[in-house]
Amino acid sequence: MNLSYQVLDLPLKHTFTIAHQSRDVQDTLIVKLEENGIYGLGESTTNPFYGMTIENMVACLEKFREIVEAGKWESPEQLWELGREVFGENPFAQCALDMAAWDLFTKKQGKKLYEFLGLNPAKIPTTNFTIGIDTVEKMVSKMKEVDWPIYKIKLGTDSDLEIIRELRKHTNSIFRIDANCAWTAEQAIRNSEELAKLGVEFMEQPLGKDDLEGMKEVFKHSKLPVMADESCIVESDVKKCHGLFHAINVKLVKAGGITPGLRMIHEAKSLGMKTMVGCMTESSVGITAIAHIAPLLDYVDMDGAMLLTKDPAKGVKITPEQVKFPDGPGIGAELV
């Protein structure tokens, strides 16, 4: 068993701005596991908000290299458990490794990942397409650039409602809004009334992740369903979100990979909550992995590769009508 990795820069088509950061280029780490001529790929992007860098991800992988390359693990779940302590503070690195392990494992089984999991790709919900914060004119332009049935609109400005009112003039598509912790409970409740009239489907993470009392009020009085993102990072967060949110957005890189991501989805469903998996502007390596588990979801946000000027990988092909997977077993994404 051989573990290797490489760092890639992912140039974005537009400056991507959310409530707490902006970027023009996204750094990403591609992990490769190879054994007997068969290899699996995984990915995790960096994120300054969570303190995840190429350097600390690589450091974690190096600490774990000996165990990985010894090959004394029979499944991705087993490898994930072996790495629980090493990767405790760096789930991003564990995600890239876990994804590569699933790719390699299912290739050895001769099955696509969704086949191994017993999922039906015909049940994949349509992804949203994300519009980052910008001037209203540029946000309208970005929306017109990609005609899509569902848009996720990033908010967290002094003119959030005005933005949605203006965007609504230019499309009948469904809107989802993501405030990335920027609002107070009072703002969220008040904004939900107007947003509901403007064809918004749900609000994602309106308050700061620790504002539990505020979320109780929003959950009780909002005119729209509310979805957890920053409040639901790891498995132990799912139960905490019950009664505060109607749905959770699982980010594989924040959770630590496909292995815990699947557990989080199933737990949320058992609690009667709806589920979404979101992306962190990955290339087609990470996006293709998300697509394989998307049949489990009520909503999906896997537009990351669509936001890139150049995708360094090939994998799943996404249109509003269908999701077409690569030929062959495993996750199936490849670097080009």
Image: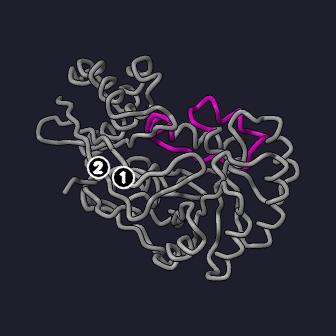
Mark seen at residue 9: 2
First along the sequence among labels 1 and 2? 2
Mark seen at residue 295: none
Image quadrant holding the N terminus, namely top left
Find out whether residue 128 is within the magenta segment.
Answer: no
Percent across and percent down for residue 56 are 36, 27
Per the image, the residue denoted by label 1 is: 25
Q: Is residue 218 above or below residue 239?
A: below
Q: Number of numbered discs present?
A: 2
Percent across and percent down for residue 207 are 72, 44
The residues colored magenta run 232-261
- Compare residues 36 and 219 and report the one nearer the observer: 219
Q: Secondary structure at mark 1?
A: strand
Q: Is residue 55 left or right of residue 17?
A: left
The image quadrant that residue 209 belongs to is top right
User: Which residue is depicted at the point 11% across and 41% down?
Assistant: 37
Percent across and percent down for residue 38 are 16, 42
User: Which residue is depicted at the point 87% across and 48% down?
Assistant: 220
Residue 191 shows in the view: yes
Residue 109 shows in the view: no
In 3D space, how far apart are the residues under numbered discs 1 and 2 (Cα atoms)? 6 Å
Q: Amino acid at mark 1?
A: Val
Q: Secondary structure at mark 2?
A: strand
Coloring applied to the structure: one colour
Q: Is residue 89 above or below residue 183?
A: above
Mark 1: few, some, or many residues within 10 Å (few <14, many ≥20)?
some
